């Protein structure tokens, strides 16, 4: 008899511990992948298959070497450009343009988005105009930018900033306009106003949306980078694209595309990690 | 709980409503008057419940008292000084806890503290309040990690942190289950016995009104199209803590329910 309660409490205890552990993990997805460590690598399956298909198609001569050079030729082109010291410059200048344009555009988007989202007057006054500017296709700005700023770094960074501005502006202004009015009212009844209200309630409430907007803006920045470099550049991955097209260097052209994919994905991964942290630190419920 | 004493003692205020009316702009320039000629005074430390059928303007009256909305006519005064806009002498507890989801319970309660409270005082005061409402062990938890009843207690602690002369409660226990509601009512009475702030409580629960308050004010209308006003004021017999099964209260409850249009069988 005396043994029975002792044997009974053990499973109950372990069950409680197991439950509290499950409760501590905020992402149940982690639990389901814990037993299958290879699952995250599933995303690599498709690129590897494509690579194999690419190699097969070019080796069997389905496409000519000019149409589709083999992956090995692309790697050789990369090593060649690296050896001449050009590849590093192309990557560095493109990354610099993206980061500069993204930073400027995102900061302006944050500022104007906050202004329009928080002030009813600003919304009435400025929102229609900004909305109309947003409707202008990105490439339509190029002639004007060339005319005003000239073919230099400034016009390229400006175009990228325009591209990064709108996703941030749109998400920030919309998110701020939709912060739970009950939370705002509660804070106001405790004497919190103005800047204090913004930093205590509104900013934390919209942070997850802001970071989502930043991710969109970064993708836009890479998009606009290529647009900027296709038209009048002497360096950068977009220049490598047009230059290779003119010289018939399909291997370098493919290299530029692969590099754009890798760079875009890497910068997005960094922001994605930040986004996950923000969502845990500033939950919306 | 009774052994706990708060460092800041509340100094209850009286609050006077004189001829309060509230109208809203309706469609096509029409004016919809919700309240008219509401006059009464709550004395320091008194608990007054305001009951009435839904949509009669109970919450609107409370929002006017809080300075969240301006009265169309009449004036609310607290200790003789008119309420214009949000008032530091008033704290509000809403039907929903309205806690900031990204802040710990302790930091949410600290939001209620008057501006410029020194850091050490603030921490001690928040600790005391959390223990008062039975959340001493949950200071570091986030709102979504605690139950609805606990969140409502945190909300009450936040209102008390303001050290209010008048505590306005807008159906604070309305969203809670019956058992939690009973516990919260007793908790409110414990707190009030310790620091008797003046409390105005809007509720749709007649039993709750009779159990908690010194007076019950009934808001109602003679016909559905006219604005609501005070149709009856009831002095609740006896002293707190009251017996929930008291016969007088049961009869009074039946009477008030009948007045609100509910006939019991």
Image (spheres, rainbow, N blue to C red):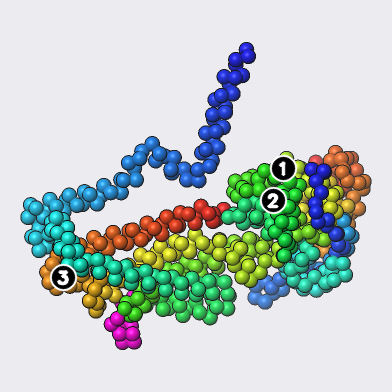
- Whether tag 1 and tag 2 are in contact, CB under 8 A, the answer is no
**Which tag, 1 or 2, sits closer to the chain's start?**
2
Relative height, residue A147 to residue B228 (above, below): below
Relative height, residue A49 to residue A220 (above, below): above
What residue is at 39 percent from the left and 58 percent from the top?
Answer: A270
Q: Disc 1 marks which residue?
A: B180
Q: Residues within 10 Å of mark 3 (few under 14, many from 20)?
A: some
Q: Disc 2 marks which residue?
A: B154
Relative height, residue B247 to residue B68 (above, below): above
Count of numbered badges drawn on the protein: 3
- Of all residues, the one furthest to the right in this rendering is B238
Q: Which residues are magenta?
A: A138-152
Q: Is A150 one of the magenta-colored residues?
A: yes
Q: Which mark is residue A245?
A: 3
- Specify whether disc 1 shares its chain with disc 2: yes
Residue B227 image position (x, y, % from top left) = 78, 66
Is residue A115 in view from this perspective?
A: yes
The foreground one among B11 and B258 is B11
What residue is at 60 percent from the left and 19 percent from the top?
Answer: A6
Tell me the distance, in whole angstroms, between the alpha carbons under discs 1 and 3.
73 Å
Secondary structure beneath disc 1?
helix
Tell me the distance, in whole angstroms, between the alpha carbons under discs 3 and 2.
66 Å
The foreground one among A32 and B66 is A32
Q: Residues within 10 Å of mark 2 (few under 14, many from 20)?
A: many
Query: What chain does mark 2 sit on?
Result: B
Quadrant housing the C terminus of chain B: top right
């Amino acid at each position: 008899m005396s043994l029975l309660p002792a044997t009974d409490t053990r499973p109950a205890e372990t069950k409680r511990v197991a439950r509290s552990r499950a409760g501590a993990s905020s992402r149940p997805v982690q639990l389901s992948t814990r037993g299958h460590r290879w699952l995250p690598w599933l995303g690599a399956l498709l690129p590897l298959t494509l690579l194999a298909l690419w190699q097969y198609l070019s080796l069997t001569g389905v496409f000519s070497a000019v149409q589709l050079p083999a992956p090995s030729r692309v790697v050789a082109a990369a090593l060649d450009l690296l050896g001449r010291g050009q590849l590093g410059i192309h990557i560095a200048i493109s990354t610099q343009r993206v980061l500069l344009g993204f930073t400027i555009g995102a900061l302006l988007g944050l500022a104007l988005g906050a202004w329009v989202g928080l002030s009813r007057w600003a919304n009435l006054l400025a929102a229609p105009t900004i909305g109309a500017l947003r409707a202008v296709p990105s490439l339509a700005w190029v002639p004007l930018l060339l005319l005003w700023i000239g073919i230099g770094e400034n016009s390229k960074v400006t175009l990228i900033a325009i591209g990064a501005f709108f996703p941030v502006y749109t998400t920030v202004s919309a998110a701020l306009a939709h912060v739970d009015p009950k939370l705002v009212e509660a804070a106001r009844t405790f004497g919190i106003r103005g800047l204090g209200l913004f930093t205590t309630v509104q900013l934390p409430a919209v942070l997850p949306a802001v970071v989502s907007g930043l991710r969109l803006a970064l993708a836009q920045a890479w998009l606009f980078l290529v647009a900027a470099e296709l038209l009048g550049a002497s360096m950068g991955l977009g220049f490598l694209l047009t230059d290779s097209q003119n010289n018939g260097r399909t291997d370098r052209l493919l290299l530029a595309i692969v590099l754009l994919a890798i760079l875009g994905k890497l910068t997005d991964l960094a922001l994605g990690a930040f986004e996950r942290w923000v969502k845990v630190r500033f939950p919306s419920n | 709980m009774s052994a706990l004493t708060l460092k800041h003692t509340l100094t209850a205020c009286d609050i006077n409503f004189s001829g309060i009316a509230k109208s809203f702009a309706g469609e096509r320039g029409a004016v919809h008057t919700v309240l008219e000629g509401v006059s009464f005074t709550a004395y320091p430390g008194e608990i007054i419940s305001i009951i009435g059928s839904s949509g009669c303007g109970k919450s609107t009256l409370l929002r006017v008292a809080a300075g969240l909305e301006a009265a169309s006519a009449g004036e609310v005064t607290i200790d003789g000084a008119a309420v214009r806009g949000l008032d530091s002498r008033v704290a509000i507890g809403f039907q929903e806890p309205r806690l900031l989801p990204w802040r710990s319970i302790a930091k949410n309660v600290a939001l209620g503290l008057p501006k410029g409270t020194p850091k050490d005082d603030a921490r001690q005061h928040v600790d005391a309040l959390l223990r008062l409402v039975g959340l001493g062990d949950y200071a570091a938890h986030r709102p979504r990690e605690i139950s609805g009843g606990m969140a409502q207690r945190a909300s009450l602690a936040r209102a008390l942190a303001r050290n209010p002369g008048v505590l306005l409660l807008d159906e604070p226990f309305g969203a809670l289950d019956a058992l939690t509601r009973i516990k919260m009512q007793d908790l409110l009475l414990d707190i009030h016995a310790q620091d008797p702030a003046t409390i105005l409580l809007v509720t749709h629960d007649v039993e709750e009104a009779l159990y908690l308050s010194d007076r019950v004010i009934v808001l109602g209308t003679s016909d559905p199209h006219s604005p609501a006003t005070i149709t009856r004021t009831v002095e609740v017999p006896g002293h707190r803590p009251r017996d929930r099964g008291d016969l007088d209260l049961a009869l009074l409850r039946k009477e008030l329910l009948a007045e609100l249009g509910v006939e019991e069988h």
